Amino acid sequence: MKQKLMAFMVVMTVFSTTLVAQTPLTKIGYTNVDFIIGKLPEAKKMQNELEITKAQLDKAIGETYKEFQEKYEAYQKNGANMTDVIRADKEKELQSLQTRVQEMQNNAQTSLQNKQQQLLEPILTKVNDAIQAVGKENGFLYILNMDGGAGTTPIILFAASEEHNATNLILKKLGVDPDKLEEEAAAPAPAAPAKPATAPKK
């Protein structure tokens, strides 16, 4: 019985070794989608548009708040001399302006989020198409995202080498030269202009 069991173990070992040898190694790549998006011209254009929109919204809110502030100061200064009817009317106007400022702030936040989503959607689609193409062309079974998102633990915690880092392949597919990015990152920052020497006081 013992000999039969040993013979069975030998056969299974040989079978398992042969199966592993015939099975192609799984090629799993990884990248960082946020990093890739940040290097695209479309992302920089999106950021500029968002900043312009935010500045416009802030200006409108600021003008309304300034109006509230001026009318509130006038009310504080002259309220004691107003009739009850005029005072009540001014208080109602102030309350209305205060509510309007709060609504404008809330609407501005929602408007910015919607605009960001609208501008980001085609960029995400473009990046996803590039990832799909790189995966198929280079024989990856999976391409994982290293960054799980803000406030989350990264999906990949350790990589023994850069061999399966698909980031540069994806950037090239998107028309971005990774070598140029490295040169820009390594280039020293421009020196700040020297301040003119101050003449000694006499």
Image: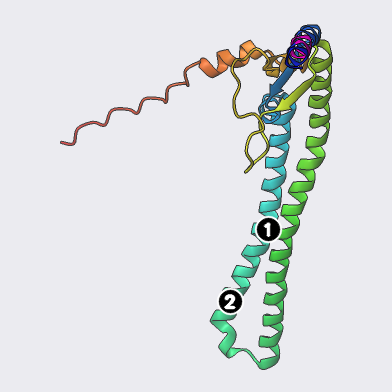
Number of the label disc, if any, that sits on residue 22: none
SS of the residue at dot 2? helix
Q: Position of residue 161 (x, y in %)?
A: 60, 15
Instruction: Check disc 1 and report the residue beneath it.
Output: 61
Q: Residue at x 71, y 16 (%)?
A: 176
Label 1 amino acid? Ile
* Classed neighbour count for the residue bearing mark 2: other residues with Cα under 10 Å, few (<14), some (14–19), many (≥20): few
Label 2 amino acid? Ala
Q: Main secondary structure of the magenta part?
A: helix
Task: Name the image colouring.
Answer: rainbow
| 130 lies above or below 66 | above
> On the rendered structure, is 187 left or right of 147?
left
Number of the label disc, if any, that sits on residue 74: 2
Mark 2 vs mark 1, CA separation in Å: 20 Å
Q: Which residues are magenta?
A: 7-13
Foreground of the two, 59 or 99 = 99
Q: Residue at x 51, y 16 (%)?
A: 186
